[in-house]
Image: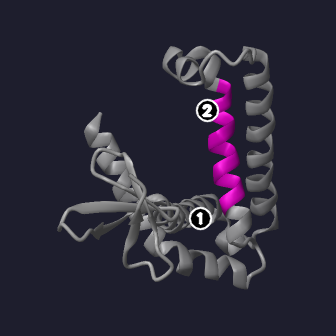
């Protein structure tokens, strides 16, 4: 299973690097752009997952007991898959004959490339936003600053950050 994951990650990296040149060619001919490729791949994958969710116990268990019936998952999955396939189909029909043989594969490369780039940017950006900042107190101990509150290594609130952001006022 881990070899499949490694292969998938390598393919994602390749798609991310090739995305600009592949999308540029099709964009120049007015066939598709980044948004259409992104929506097509993501809706298609979401549709397949939605359809398979009621039938795979691990996927059903991960959704929790929310009271959502299997029919809803199937319905949403079918709708997402239909929209994704429709995006591929309309793009293929719009594509010039000289590019049609590679159109769907190129659109998958573009969609995966955009998805990976978005994931790398936003996951890194969000992670940076939600991680606490480390700081040293006057005793040389490491404390953590999150939302103007200062916490010790045990997670106990020990103070509030001052206006200059370099020190804190103890509250306990």
Number of other residues with Cα within 10 Å of mark 1, as a class: few under 14, some 14 to 19, many 20 or more: few
Location of mark 1 (residue): 102
Q: Is residue 94 left or right of residue 35?
A: right
Q: Quadrant of the N terminus?
A: top left
Residue range of the region highlighted in magenta in the rendering: 38-51
Q: Which mark is residue 49?
A: 2
Residue at 80% x, 26% y: name it. 75
Residue at 78% x, 31% y: name it. 76
Position in image of residue 42 (x %, y %): 65, 50
Residue at 78% x, 17% y: name it. 71
Quadrant of the image occupied by residue 29: bottom right
Q: Is 99 rendered above or below residue 50?
A: below
Quadrant of the image occupied by residue 32: bottom right
Position in image of residue 2 (x %, y %): 27, 38
- Helix, strand or loop under label 1: helix
Q: Is 125 rendered above or below residue 54?
A: below
């Amino acid at each position: 299973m881990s070899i499949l994951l490694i292969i998938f990650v390598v393919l994602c990296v390749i798609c991310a690097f090739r995305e600009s040149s592949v999308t540029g060619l099709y964009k120049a001919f007015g066939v598709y752009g980044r948004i259409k490729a992104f929506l097509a791949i993501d809706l298609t994958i979401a549709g397949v997952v939605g359809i398979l969710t009621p039938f795979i116990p691990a996927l059903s268990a991960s959704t929790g007991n929310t009271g959502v019936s299997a029919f809803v998952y199937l319905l949403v999955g079918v709708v997402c898959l239909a929209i994704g396939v429709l995006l591929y189909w309309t793009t293929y029909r719009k594509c010039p004959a000289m590019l049609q043989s590679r159109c769907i594969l190129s659109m998958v490369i573009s969609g995966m490339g955009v998805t990976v780039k978005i994931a790398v940017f936003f996951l890194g950006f969000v992670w940076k936003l939600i991680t606490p900042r480390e700081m040293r107190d006057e005793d040389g101990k490491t404390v953590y600053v999150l939302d103007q509150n200062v916490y010790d290594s045990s997670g106990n609130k020990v103070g509030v950050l001052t206006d200059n952001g370099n020190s804190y006022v103890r509250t306990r």
